[in-house]
Amino acid sequence: MIYNDPDTDDTQSMVKKYQEKYPNIRYHRNEVRIGMMPSMLNAISMCVGKYVWLFSDDDMMSDIAIKTIMDVAKQQNP
């Protein structure tokens, strides 16, 4: 789920390119800017699945992040 609180960059066209390769990517763009916390709550409400992992546009994921999180989730079953 990619949730866009409107900005001036070209997020929408970049997401479309990834959606062609990964059709399971969902995208939502607000009509008007509502701010970080309301956007996060809206994004969470649109997610499907067992877990949600929030990232902002300036967050970077390490190379082993997904494997580490999956290992912990399997062990802990939070």
Image (spheres, rainbow, N blue to C red):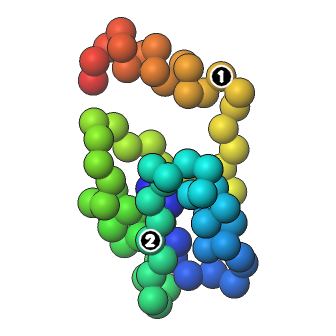
Count of all numbered marks drawn on residues in the image: 2
Q: Spot the residue most to the front.
A: 20
Q: Tell me whether circle 2 and circle 1 mark residues in contact (CB < 8 Å).
A: no
Residue under the point 50% across and 60% down: 2
Label 1 CA crowd tier, 10 Å (few <14, some 14–19, many 20+): few
Residue 26 at x, y percent in the picture: 44, 59
Residue 29 at x, y percent in the picture: 48, 77
Q: Quadrant of the C terminus?
A: top left
Q: Amino acid at mark 2?
A: His
User: Relative to 29, is 15 above or below?
Assistant: above
Going from N to C along the chain, the mark reached first, 2 or 1, is 2
User: Relative to 39, is 45 above or below?
Assistant: above
Residue labelled with disc 1:
64
The numbered mark at residue 17 is none
Residue under the point 45% across and 89% down: 31
Q: Is residue 61 visible?
A: yes
Secondary structure of the residue carrying numbered label 1: loop
Nearer to us in this view, 21 or 57? 21
Residue 42, image quadrant: bottom left
Residue labelled with disc 2:
28
User: Relative to 68, is 14 above or below?
Assistant: below
Residue under the point 32% across and 53% down: 47
Q: What is the C-alpha distance between the residues marked 2 and 1? A: 28 Å
Secondary structure of the residue carrying numbered label 2: strand
In this picture, residue 40 sits left or right of residue 16: left
Residue 67 at x, y percent in the picture: 56, 20
Q: Amino acid at mark 1?
A: Ile
In this picture, residue 70 sits left or right of residue 62: left
